[in-house]
């Protein structure tokens, strides 16, 4: 676990804070998540590299559990410095969560990801896989055949007063 954002990871480990963040940011203030329905989910997933299996860790992950069944998985990346290829990290984390469901007999559930930026500056990173690939020279014709991944980034130090008012926890 990186030292640079340990405080943010610890803060998000509280179910009420996690639910509050998702409700305030992803759901626009609608109370979709309740703290008692938020349960820790794995943050580690695996992928095969050139010569061996590697692991990767997302910052925070939680399930929405209703009536004993997993309905959703949320993955939050806490960042103090956004990377130009941040959208690939999101795709990788979500891909790992979907891969874990592949051979399960249980119903498949959606995985929702967001990035929370704790820096004091905005950034102009690509907000979608298509945007990144265009910057790298991919043609529009090829992009029409590529599934797009969109990156939701919330700049915590630059939130509007309207968004800040949505929070109800110690956040």
Image: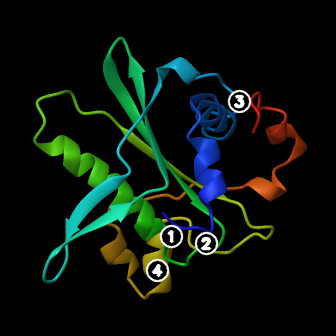
In percent of width and height, residue 124 lies at 67, 75
In percent of width and height, residue 7 lies at 66, 54
Residue pointed to by mark 3: 29
- Are circles 1 and 2 on residues that touch, CB within 8 Å? yes
Disc 3 residue crowd, few under 14, some 14–19, many 20+, Cα 10 Å: some
Disc 1 residue crowd, few under 14, some 14–19, many 20+, Cα 10 Å: many
Question: In the drawing, does residue 133 fall left or right of residue 78?
Answer: left
Q: Earlier in the sequence, mark 2 or mark 4?
A: 2
The disc placed on residue 134 is 4
Q: Earlier in the sequence, mark 3 or mark 4?
A: 3
The disc placed on residue 16 is none
Q: Give the residue displayed 64% in from the left and 22% down from the top.
A: 31
Of the residues tagged 3 and 4, which is closer to the observer? 3
Residue pointed to by mark 2: 82
Furthest toward the right, the residue is 161
Q: Secondary structure at mark 1?
A: helix
Place residue 29 in its image quadrant. top right
Q: Earlier in the sequence, mark 3 or mark 2?
A: 3
In space, the residues marked 1 and 4 are separated at their CA atoms by 15 Å
């Amino acid at each position: 676990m990186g030292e640079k954002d340990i405080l943010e990871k610890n803060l998000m480990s509280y179910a009420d804070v996690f639910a509050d963040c998702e409700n305030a940011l992803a759901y626009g203030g609608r109370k979709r998540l309740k703290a008692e329905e938020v349960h820790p989910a794995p943050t580690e997933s695996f992928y095969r590299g050139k010569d061996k299996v590697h692991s990767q860790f997302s910052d925070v992950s939680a399930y929405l559990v209703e009536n004993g069944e997993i309905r959703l998985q949320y993955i939050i990346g806490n960042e103090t410095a956004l990377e130009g290829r941040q959208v690939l990290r999101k795709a990788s984390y979500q891909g790992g969560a979907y891969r874990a469901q592949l051979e399960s007999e249980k119903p498949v559930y959606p995985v929702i990801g967001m990035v929370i930026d704790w820096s004091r500056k905005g950034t102009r990173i690509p907000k979608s896989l298509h945007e990144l690939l265009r910057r790298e020279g991919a043609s529009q014709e090829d992009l029409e055949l590529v599934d797009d991944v969109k990156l939701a980034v919330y700049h915590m130090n630059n939130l509007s007063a309207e968004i800040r008012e949505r929070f109800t926890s110690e956040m």
